């Protein structure tokens, strides 16, 4: 795995953490769903599943 | 287009509009729900694998937006944006016209790097607005100047999300747009500001503002080299963005997310100390709705492809007489932008771009984004004026009224550019 791939995955993982924090700090269900929607591809990319 | 295809298209557009306007769902969730509705209506069930695949379409853009918004939050908190505004006022305060041009570009800046008009209004707009009002501009004119610069900032390079959305829909890379987007945004933004504000600046009050800004800079704790240090993150970001293009093959390309994260890390320690984690959370919170829209747009485009509707739209659009097509673009695209500029780019921008395949696509996409962005002023959402009115004060409809003529002019210019796309492309060497 190249260095730039590791950096890319770290950035994706950082984004996952920030969106998860948003998911739990938002009170409205619409905001929670939006955060969940964004989270799906981010998690899969951080894990390089897709 | 066949009857069933037309019905499916109507169902998709109708369900999206109903979910946004009647059910008051966010645009992102409405796009996702409309995608599922389309798949169900086309007899595809709920194709989870295709829906998830669609979510990835704009993932790299989402990462750029997250990183750019974090950078914006850090340079807002460390005092760079306020310092930049004060320095420009002192440096260019002798000429109201030159100062207005500079302040317009300052307002545009956050939108340019994040692709979000909210970043412009809430980032630099709220810093520049009091300066404009102290120069003698009425509140609604100030709101109109901020709104207009924010809308043009949203579609200015390097990050133009509507062009990225349409480009993703027609499999076109986001390359070669820099010059034409700069011309199509900075020129009308400056002309709009001049039209709105030039005659309203009072020279005596401007002199007072310059004197106050000079005093604030003198009183600032950060003087000399520390002031210079404040600009370092901005200089590094510009160098990392321009370096790979200026010295290709020699200068490593860190790409935009890493560029903005490096800038954020530097900005957190240059000037006022900024807690990076808190700035990152604030940035992601602000840009999350836009990121959600991009994920939803990706799902919708994937469903349009799965159901064969995307091809049907292309065939249908190619058979529309060109005069009718240009009139439709000039009217429908901004009207749909009244719900969501990004939604309009995906639902209508992609078919319109496909219908204009014989013309230079870089010029076509740039012009479509210009026309679509004018929908930002239109009710029912009137997103940018509403945010500007919330930040500056006053009713948003007055801002809308002030921006109506320049926005209509921009739609006319955008339509003419579409009609003469190939000659325009030659002028820009595209």
Image (cartoon, grey):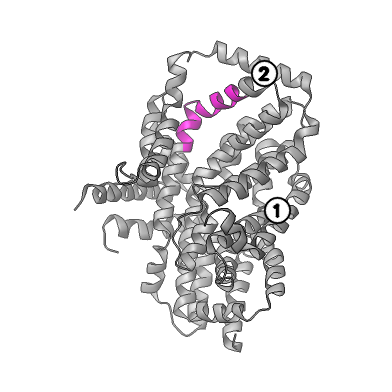
Secondary structure character of the magenta stretch overall: helix
Mark 1 secondary-structure assignment: helix
Residue mark closest to the camera, 1 vs 2 = 1
Q: Residues within 10 Å of mark 1 (few under 14, many from 20)?
A: many
Per the image, is B85 magenta? Answer: yes
Q: Residue at x 62, y 34 (%)?
A: B126
What x and y, as percent, mark residue B280? 41, 39
Task: In the displayed orientation, state which residue is furthest to the left.
Answer: A1
**Which of the numbered marks, if any, corresponds to residue B276?**
none
Q: How far, Cα to Cα, is label 1 from label 2?
A: 33 Å
Residue for point 48% across, 29% down: B77
**Number of marks in the image?**
2
Tell me which segment is drawn in magenta.
B72-88
Residue at 38 percent of width and 68 percent of height: B52
Asked whether B103 or B12 is in front, the reply is: B103
The numbered mark 1 sits on a residue in which chain?
B
Where is residue B300 drawn, in percent x and y? 49, 70
Q: Is residue B53 magenta?
A: no
According to the picture, the residue beneath numbered tag 2 turns out to be B210
Query: Would residue B241 be found to the left or right of residue B105 on screen?
Result: left
Front residue of this view, candidates B96 and B54: B96
Q: Are marks 1 and 2 in contact (CB under 8 Å)?
A: no
Determine if residue B272 is in view: no
x and y percent of residue B251 in the render? 32, 41
Q: Which mark is residue B410?
A: 1
**Front-most of B268 and B372?**
B372
Answer left or right for A31 relative to B319. left
Residue B357, picture quadrant: bottom right
Of all chains, the one bearing label 2 is: B
Which comes before the other along the chain, label 1 or label 2? 2
Secondary element type, mark 2: helix
């Amino acid at each position: 795995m190249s260095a730039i791939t590791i950096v890319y995955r770290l950035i994706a993982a950082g984004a996952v953490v920030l969106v998860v924090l948003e998911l739990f700090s938002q009170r409205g269900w619409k905001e929670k769903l939006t955060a969940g929607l964004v989270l799906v591809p981010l998690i899969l990319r951080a894990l390089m599943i897709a | 287009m066949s009857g069933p295809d037309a019905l499916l298209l109507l169902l998709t557009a109708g369900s999206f509009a109903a979910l946004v306007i009647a059910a008051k769902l966010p645009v992102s969730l409405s796009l996702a729900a409309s995608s599922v509705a389309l798949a169900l209506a086309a007899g595809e069930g709920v194709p989870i694998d295709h829906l998830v695949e669609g979510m990835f379409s704009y993932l790299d853009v989402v990462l750029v937006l997250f990183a750019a918004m974090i950078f914006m939050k850090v340079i807002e908190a460390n005092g760079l944006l306020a310092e930049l505004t004060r320095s420009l006022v002192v440096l260019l305060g002798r000429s109201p016209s030159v100062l207005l041009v500079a302040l317009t570009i300052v307002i545009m800046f956050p939108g340019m790097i994040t692709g979000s008009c909210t970043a412009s209004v809430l980032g630099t707009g709220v810093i520049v607005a009091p300066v404009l009002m102290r120069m003698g501009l009425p509140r609604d004119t100030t709101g109109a100047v901020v709104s207009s610069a924010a809308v043009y900032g949203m579609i200015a390079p390097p990050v133009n999300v509507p062009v990225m959305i349409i480009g993703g829909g027609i499999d076109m890379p986001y390359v070669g747009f820099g010059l034409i987007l700069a011309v199509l945004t900075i020129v009308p933004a400056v002309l709009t500001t001049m039209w709105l504000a030039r005659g309203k600046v009072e020279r005596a009050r401007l002199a007072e503002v310059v004197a106050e800004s000079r005093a604030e800079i003198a009183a600032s704790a950060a003087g000399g080299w520390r002031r210079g240090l404040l600009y370092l993150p901005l200089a590094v970001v510009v160098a990392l963005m321009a370096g790979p293009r200026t010295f290709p093959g020699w200068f490593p390309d860190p790409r935009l997310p890493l560029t903005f994260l490096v800038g954020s890390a530097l900005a957190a320690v240059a000037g006022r100390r900024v807690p990076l984690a808190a700035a990152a959370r604030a940035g992601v919170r602000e840009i999350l709705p836009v990121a959600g829209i991009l994920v939803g747009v990706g799902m919708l485009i994937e469903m349009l492809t799965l159901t064969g509707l995307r091809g049907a739209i292309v065939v249908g659009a190619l058979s529309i007489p060109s005069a009718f097509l240009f009139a439709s673009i000039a009217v429908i695209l901004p009207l749909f932008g009244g719900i969501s500029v990004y939604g309009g780019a995906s639902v209508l921008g992609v078919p319109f771009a496909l219908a204009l395949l014989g013309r230079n696509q870089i010029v076509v996409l740039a012009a479509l984004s210009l026309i679509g962005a004018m929908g930002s002023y239109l009710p029912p959402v009137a997103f940018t004026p509403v945010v500007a009115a919330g930040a500056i004060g006053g009713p948003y409809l007055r801002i809308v009224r002030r921006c109506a003529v320049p926005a209509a002019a921009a739609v006319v210019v955008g339509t003419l550019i579409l009609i003469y796309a190939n000659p325009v492309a030659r002028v820009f060497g595209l």
